[in-house]
Image (cartoon, rainbow, N blue to C red):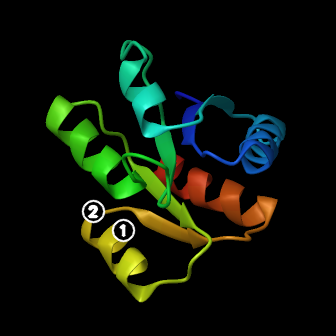
Amino acid sequence: MNVRVIVVEDDPGMRQAMIRILGLGGFEPVAYASAEELLAAPSSEPALCMILDVQLPGLNGFALHERLVALGRARPAIFISAFEESDARAQATQAGAAFLPKPFSGHALLDSVRRLAAA
């Protein structure tokens, strides 16, 4: 099973926390600070899923996901946001993705990733 998880989060502290939690959970996180950084990266590394912050500077998480779908690089996604907006949750659901409001526990993050792994 592929254990690589792509994380796109602009907040350095949050990004580091997710890297640590995912690593402790047995996953191999690959983190990016922006949508543009991920898009500029080589696409040869397969991943189990992507964790995308909704409020990224520049291209937001939803626009990034749409771009990755168009490029054939999309993976199952978990959108995360500090804003519990019903719009964001609905948009995540419409994209066939999970949604986690910040702050979330390490257990909630790992449970979400494990559900995608089991699907």
Q: The residue under label 2 is which amino acid type?
A: Ala
Name the element at disc 2: loop
Above or below, comparing residue 115 to residue 94 in the picture? above
Q: Which residue is mark 1?
A: 92
Tell me how many marks there are: 2
Residue toward you, 93 or 61: 61
Q: Which residue is mark 2?
A: 95
* Mark 2, other Cα within 10 Å: few <14 / some 14–19 / many ≥20: some
Give how far across and how far down residue 20 sits, in percent: 82, 39
Residue drawn at x 75%, y 38% is 19
- Extreme residue toward the left, this view: 70
- Marks 2 and 1, how far apart at CA: 5 Å
Vertically, is 29 above or below 60? above
Residue displayed at 41% across by 53% down:
61
Q: Amino acid at mark 1?
A: Ala
Q: Nearer the viewer, residue 110 or 81?
A: 81
Residue 4 marker? none
Q: Position of residue 72 (x, y in %)?
A: 20, 31
The residue that appears at 44% across and 16% down in the rendered structure is 45
Where residue 5 sits: x, y (%)? 57, 35
Residue at the far bottom in the pictured view: 86
Residue 112: image quadrant is: bottom right
Residue at the extreme front = 58
Secondary structure of the residue carrying numbered label 1: helix
Q: Is residue 101 left or right of residue 96?
A: right
Callout 2–callout 1 Cβ contact below 8 Å: yes
